[in-house]
Image (spheres, helix red, strand yellow):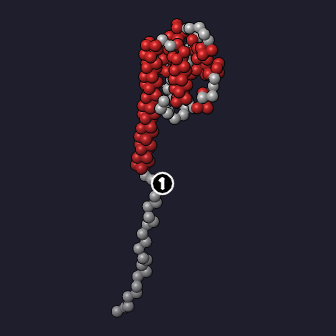
Amino acid sequence: MQASQPLALKDIHLPDGVSWWPPAPGYWLILFICITIIAFVFFIRHLKQRSRLKKAALEELALIKTHYQNNLDDKQIVMQLSALLRRTAISQFPRTDCASLTGKNWLSWLDKQFKNENSFSAGPGYLLTEFNYSNTTHANDVKELLSLTEQWIKQLPAINKSGVKAI
């Protein structure tokens, strides 16, 4: 008998492990869906906060109107409307854009944000800057300023350039 020679067999080699990168298409789809859901949640939250800003400003305006109808104090209402416009503007827009503005620059800025051009600077908005220094009464202009303020708040721009803060 012939002596058997060992066969020239090689050891079993396992394939390389599966790499974690690039992920399978299903993982990309899950990642895309998660990012979309997160963006949608932030968008809805932003819209709700913005609607709360308008609602709070309009509620305060309603209180100012009621107070004016009871007291008919023109100077007081003009001061309250000025403060409301200022707070609403600072809450809606970047502070650096509107907080430091005064006089005609403030009125021009309000006009720029408003669809009806020159409503503040050429219309009843002049009361915001000049009424405290005047001795005459402007009952009709005050009523026009009330409606102008309400229109301005209702048409606040849809896109906010900064985070929305509560009034």
Residue 57, placed above or below residue 143: below
Whole-percent x, y for residue 59 in the image: 43, 22
Residue denoted by label 1: 22
Residue at position x 42%, y 76% in the image = 11
In the rendered image, the quadrant that contains the N terminus is bottom left
Which is nearer the eye, 141 or 105?
Answer: 141
Residue 21, placed above or below residue 160: below
Would residue 162 be found to the left or right of residue 51 on screen?
A: right
Residue at position x 60%, y 10% in the image = 135
Q: How many marks?
A: 1
Residue at position x 63%, y 25% in the image = 101
Whole-percent x, y for residue 132 in the image: 60, 16
For mark 1, does the 10 Å Cα neighbourhood hold few (<14), some (14 to 19), or many (20 or more) residues? few
As helix, strand or loop, the secondary structure at mark 1 comes to loop
Q: Is residue 94 visible?
A: yes
Would residue 116 be found to the left or right of residue 13 on screen?
A: right
Image quadrant in which you'd find residue 105: top right
**Residue occupying the far left of the picture:** 1
Image quadrant in which you'd find residue 106: top right
Q: Tell me the amino acid under the disc marked 1.
A: Pro
Q: Is residue 112 visible?
A: no
Which is nearer the eye, 100 or 133?
Answer: 133
